[in-house]
Amino acid sequence: MTSLDKPTTDTEDIAAAAQDARAVTEAALFEAFGGMRGMIETVMPGLLFVTVYTINNDLHLSAIGAIGVSLLLVVVRLAMRDTVKHAFSGVFGVAFGVVFAMMTGNAKDFYLPGMLYTLGLALAYIITTLAGFPLLGLMLGPVFKENLSWRTRNPGRKKAYAKASYAWGLILLAKSAILFPLYWWGDTTQFGWVLVALKIPPFLLAVWLTWVFLVKAPPPIDVFAEMEAQEKAEEERKAAAARTPWS
């Protein structure tokens, strides 16, 4: 190998490492946020609710349709032996919305629990980041097998988690700033369609920004691999001690 070959090799190694970081980050975000199917499961109940209500203004029929499609999504997950956490969270969210709407008789209240959850989540992202525990790091740390190592041993990743958490918080606050005035003063049907339209774009923007920040951050420290290595080293030490004759 000549001296001219080495820079090319180093560049290729850097490019390969960057590609690996992108792949790992994409896989982790896909697992954490549910991917395309998770987005569909998030949108479908509200979409069916507002569609039925737009057609006939029947709160009960709209509620039955939303609950029915949520349960159907869970059944599909179970039949495919896939994780059901996103589908179940959708069922609970729809159930709370139905209860609120039925109690008040106002179809707009079907969306109120989800709106309050969005606002609370936005505040949680910002407050936890200000406290030094970015919520996104708490959520994604186990997915990346780094747990909380990013807080004390990987300041670059902590900074990335802080940026991403602020992004999520501000995006969700902006969404809340649009929806709450419409909830109070807007037409029920129009409000429902605006809410459905705002389901996916803010989510995709937040996920994309998270990907951008994490791809540029230092790689995660695999604490599980470290623990396994320590356990293996301890077992080898004990085995070596057992083979050593008594002096």
Image (spheres, helix red, strand yellow):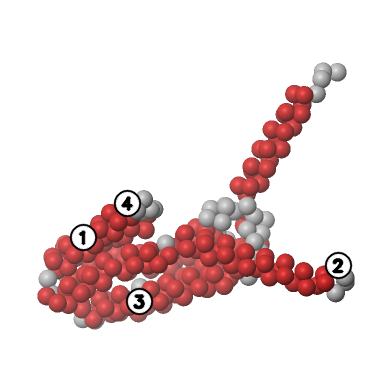
Where's the N terminus, which quadrant? bottom right
* Count of labels in the image: 4
Q: Residue at x 42, y 75 (%)?
A: 202
Image-based side of 142 in relation to 121, left or right: right
Residue type at mark 2 is Met
The residue where tag 4 is placed is 78
Kind of residue sitting beneath label 1: Gly
Mark 4 or 2, nearer chain start: 2
At x 13% / y 74%, what residue is drawn?
A: 57
Comparing labels 3 and 1, the label whose residue is closer to the camera:
1
Residue corresponding to mark 1: 68
Q: Position of residue 216 (x, y in %)?
A: 63, 70
Where is residue 130? Give x, y as percent. Answer: 54, 65
Q: Quadrant of the C terminus?
A: top right
Query: In which quarter of the view is residue 23 placed?
Result: bottom right
Task: Name which of mark 3 and mark 1 comes first in the sequence.
Answer: 1
From the image, state whether disc 3 or disc 4 is nearer to you: 4
Q: Residue at x 44, y 63 (%)?
A: 33
Badge 2 is on which residue?
A: 1
Checking the image for residue 198, the label placed there is 3
